[in-house]
Image (tube, rainbow, N blue to C red):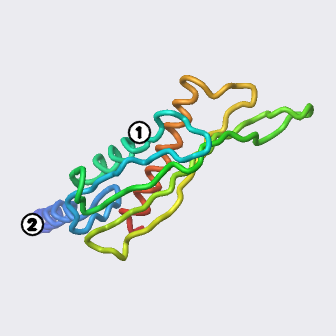
């Protein structure tokens, strides 16, 4: 009988403790809302639509991994910035001096403001890349895949920098 009582107590404690832990590691403090201002594309090479795509992907990630509500203004947590670099560069060359592999790199400058705890504010650049064969053109589905992969990585890095205490 005592084993059942002890097991019941341990089960109750473990279930209650789950309410205090986030599997994403997000620490939103007392924040209830967030806003993501439009990330303008100020890169020298402009790829149409990536500014909107990045803004939406960051909003979606924060909504999916926290209980914060998205607002248009006066958010407790504010994200803003711009896409500052979008470029393709050769990574390796063949014997006849042609690109064997190219790399698309995107860099985003992010300003994060925590209106409830200004010590957590920061401005930081985040970048990632996608490698593709030198003989291929970065168009259509491959370009969409590349941009999506880059933005998935960058938005997760922004999330980790702003909302995790690992």
Separation of marks 2 and 1 at Cα, in angstroms: 56 Å
At horizontal 19% and vertical 61% (from top left) the residue drawn is: 19
Task: Farthest residue to the right: give it.
Answer: 96
At horizontal 30% and vertical 74% (from top left) the residue drawn is: 117
Task: Farthest residue to the top: give it.
Answer: 140
At horizontal 27% and vertical 54% (from top left) the residue drawn is: 66
Left or right, 35 with respect to 121, comes to left
Residue identifier under label 2: 5
Q: Nearer the viewer, residue 12 or 162?
A: 162
At horizontal 53% and vertical 37% (from top left) the residue drawn is: 147
Q: Which x, y percent locates residue 1?
A: 7, 65
Up-down relation of residue 20 to residue 50 (above or below): below
Left or right, 115 with respect to 15, comes to right
Name the quadrant of the C terminus.
bottom left
Q: Nearer the viewer, residue 85 or 28?
A: 85
Q: In terms of sequence position, does the residue under pointer 2 or pointer 1 come before the other? A: 2
Q: Nearer the viewer, residue 84 or 143?
A: 84
Left or right, 89 with respect to 84, comes to right
Q: Secondary structure at mark 1?
A: helix
Mark 1: give few (<14), some (14-19) or many (20+) Cα within 10 Å: few
Mark 2: give few (<14), some (14-19) or many (20+) Cα within 10 Å: few
> Disc count in the image?
2
Q: Which mark is residue 70?
A: none
Q: Secondary structure at mark 2?
A: helix
Residue identifier under label 1: 52
Front disc: 2 or 1: 1
């Amino acid at each position: 009988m005592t084993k059942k009582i002890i097991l019941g107590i341990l089960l109750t404690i473990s279930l209650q403790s789950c309410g205090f832990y986030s599997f994403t590691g997000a620490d939103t403090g007392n924040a209830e809302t967030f806003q993501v201002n439009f990330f303008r594309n100020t890169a020298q090479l402009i790829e149409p639509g990536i500014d909107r795509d990045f803004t939406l992907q960051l909003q979606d990630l924060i909504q999916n991994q926290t209980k914060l509500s998205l607002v248009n203004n006066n958010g407790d947590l504010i994200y803003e910035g711009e896409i500052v670099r979008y470029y393709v560069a050769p990574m390796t060359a063949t014997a006849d001096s042609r690109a064997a592999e190219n790399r698309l790199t995107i860099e985003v400058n992010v300003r994060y403001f925590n209106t409830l705890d200004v010590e957590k504010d920061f401005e930081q650049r985040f970048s990632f890349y996608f490698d593709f064969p030198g003989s291929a053109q970065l168009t259509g589905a491959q370009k969409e895949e590349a941009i999506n992969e880059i933005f998935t990585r960058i938005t997760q890095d922004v999330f980790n920098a702003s909302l995790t205490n690992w």
